[in-house]
Amino acid sequence: MLRVYAVLIFAFLYVPILTIIVFSFGESVYPTLPITDWTLEWYRTALTDSQLLEALTKSLIIAPLVGFISATVGLLAARELARREFRGKGLVLLVLLGPLLVPLIVFGLGLLLLFSSLDVPSSIWGAVIAHSVFGISLSTLILYSRLISFRESLMESAADLGAAPARAFFEVMLPLVFPAFAAAFLLSFTLSFDEFIVAWFVIGFDTTLPVEIWGRLRYGITPEINAIATVVLLVSLTLGVLGQKLASQRKDES
Amino acid sequence: MLVFFLIPVLILTVYSFWSVENFQVQRDFSFDNYTAIFTKPLLYKAFLLSLRVAFFSSFGAVLLAFPFAYFIAKKVVKYQSLALLAVIVPFWTSFILRAYAWRILLGPNGVINQGLEAAGLIEEPIGALLYSPTATGIGLLYVYLPLAILPIYSVLERLPDSLTEAAADLGASPFQVFREVVLPLSMPGVLVAGVFTFVFGIGEYVIPALLGGGKQLLYAEAIVLRINAQQDWPAAAAMAIVLMVLTFGMVALLGRRVRKMELF
Amino acid sequence: MSQERQPAGVSLIDVTRRFGDVEAVKNVSFDIEAGEFVSLLGPSGCGKTTTLRMIAGFEYPDEGDITLDGKSIVATPPYRRDTSMVFQDYALFPHRSVAQNLAFGLRMRKIPKDEIRAKIETMLELVELPGLGDRKPDQLSGGQQQRVALGRALIVDPAVLLLDEPLGALDLQLRKQMQLELKRIHREIGITFIYVTHDQEEAITMSDRIAVMNQGSVEQIGPATEIYARPETAFVAEFIGDANVLLATVVAVGEKPTVTFAADTLTMEVARPARTFSERDVVSAVVRPENVSIGPDADSFDNVYDMEVSEVIFAGSYVRIHGLIGGSPLWLTTTVSDASRSNQVGSRVRVGWDAGDVVLVEWKS
């Protein structure tokens, strides 16, 4: 009974995603069943569409930047949080949770008003900053939960054996927390790559891929969307799987 | 970090007390934007509809999630982490696209209607499937289901089997075991699941915009409308502040009841 | 090992370390000679580990100074100190093999590669792990990990080796074996060892001198025999070995010092105390259980009493007998054959001990 139910839930989770992928190979402009003819036409259309490609490029510039900024800042912040005990630490962790809880539309609007009142020209930097706020929150929490079980004696023993702090960091800490660091990078990357609302608010005339896709969806069904969507889904699926696997990797390594 | 998170919130607050005349922001001070939310029919209807849709979708998500989380936590042994991974991963895929998928599924010529027709269950496609608050509700339920499963899983996974065994040993029927032991002890997870899916649901824009059809506006849509159609930043800001206070208020209430929140 | 490094003496001068309002280490001063094996012994929370960590450089003293070979090292960061530490949890780098763990300190010192390789081989021999260089730490047993940790600390030729309860995680048998081995290694390489432990037997077995610490202070420092025979405080008496600590009042000083005890109902002659007491001082009289004789022989001692036996406990190689003398509890240990002769619970027996076996210390409040 429960087993059948579980299978149904998995189907519920994955059928919509599969639907898009299946229809991206269907010849008909409208996504209707049964699919009579199969084609790669929509992939060709999508991959020669300069507007789509430009949006994709922007996303591919923003996302790695966000991933790197988030994971790096997150690592430094998490190290301090995990190492020190201080009053108000719970509050800091709560504030970190804030960006992940605040409705995106609230945050997007606030950031837009901030940028416009500072006369910051809208650009991809707006999106980088905005996404990094989420990414840093997420990365700090991921890395914090890893570092909290990190044995300080490892760093002490590195120092004891003659490694200066920077050396000890690169030789001992980084290799040991690397899976969590990579997870933070990948998940922040994915977050940025898929995020729409905030990007939509702050980015102005430049468009990221989600913003571009959004624009096209508003005009009705355009089959090349299925093709580009399949590509996007596969990218985020892969990164999501990798990131999540790394994040949940057993912590008994150190 | 704090600068880019807290300052936008502060600016929103400041804006929310200003007003707009002839598309020009006036830097005065009034509560008009706030009173409007609860007096203008368009706004409070959108607010109430959002509450209702979010409530039903989060209720549905928790209901669907519980047996599933129970199954993963207690019955799956070998592939538990894999099953968990499979639950989380859709959460990391594009939000827009997951919503869009439901447009394909629910549309008048969509997969579901065609399936039902082919099976001879209906003569005409059900138009109301798409572009209705119901469609929005289904979409919300779908995208936030993983978020409902995880916290429930994490409490059930830590629930020692010896407790249910002890209850059964003392003469409780399976149903009584569930009602007397499993449910009360998994309440923190259920509350986390419910509150989170609910607050995310209220503030959701993409899903109603793609699936709701625009005839009955939801709250987030009303905010965007304020900006796009009327350039009324202050009103939008006030609406956003209300949304945020509601969100944080509920999470704070939750935090008081549930000490340890484990999302990841 | 080569004698490239001369062993160095370590001195603490009025060292104090506070954590918030708590004084973890209070005005601690002692000198450790070059090449000595000194244990810091005390219950958990007595400040022994903090003291060690200050010598290593992981903690700094709020007051006072620490010198290595006469030069202050307080301002020197741990990675430039000539000390090496063996950590309680070993702190082996889990992502590195045994050989790489051993090589770590040498790499930091920019030793040439082939020299490192040679040193690793020598070290693996010294700690009796030949051929295990390629293993990862988690593929080793607890005892083996312990040896790697020791080797990793020794390979850099430190002037002082610091050991923080290094045997705490091992089972009893392994612990005894490692104690002997540490002793052997200390003899072979001759550098200064400072060893933190809460296990009195460990400290007694291995050290040249023991510093007994309690509540952040050093109560007594000296060779094990001296600390055992002449404890200076009731705490030391009870912490090192077993002791009857009797509440007593001084009634005579001079050639034949005498005290009363058991609510002033009994008197006993005592050895001349190390410090001066006056008449009517309230003191602790320390009597070791193994110095108490039981049965007819007891009559030949300076202090002889009647004891009512309340408990007889067989403890393997000896028997513990508890009882009351003049209403005051006393216990003693005796051989199995002696014990079988007399003593049933409830019987009255003669017990006795020499004046020279009684040490007077300040009354523990």
Image (cartoon, coloured by chain):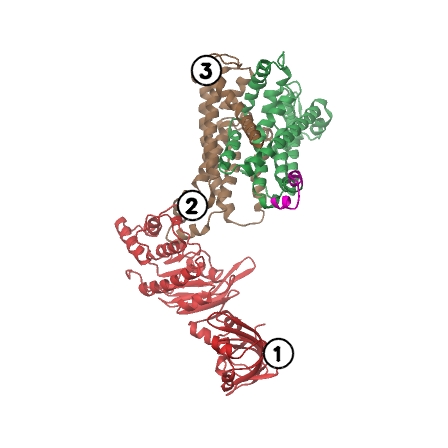
Chain colours: A brown, B green, C red
Q: Nearer the viewer, mark 1 or mark 3?
A: 1
On screen, residue B178 above or below C54: above
User: Residue B43 at what x, y percent from top left?
Assistant: 69, 24
**Is the residue C35 above or below the residue B130 in the image?**
below
Which of discs 3 and 2 lies nearer the camera? The answer is 3
Q: Which residues are magenta?
A: B165-179
> Can the viewer see residue A114?
no
Tag 2 and tag 1, C-beta contact below 8 Å:
no
**SS at circle 3:** helix
Where B16 falls versus A33 (above or below)?
below
- Residue at image location 47% in from the left, 22% down from the top: A230
Answer above or below: position of C305 versus B139. below
Q: Is residue B65 left or right of residue C13?
A: right
Residue type at mark 2 is: Met
Which residue is tagged 2?
A173
Give the Cα distance between marks 2 and 1. Answer: 62 Å
Which residue bears the numbered disc 3? Answer: A42
Tell me which label, 3 or 2, sits earlier in the chain: 3
The amino acid on which the numbered mark 3 sits, given as a three-letter code, is: Trp
Q: Are marks 2 and 1 on the same chain?
A: no
- The numbered mark 1 sits on a residue in which chain? C
**Where residue B11 appears, x then y in whole percent?**
61, 33
Q: Sort mark 3 into few (<14), some (14-19) or many (20+) by Cα contacts within 10 Å.
A: many
Cα distance between the residues tagged 1 and 3 = 101 Å
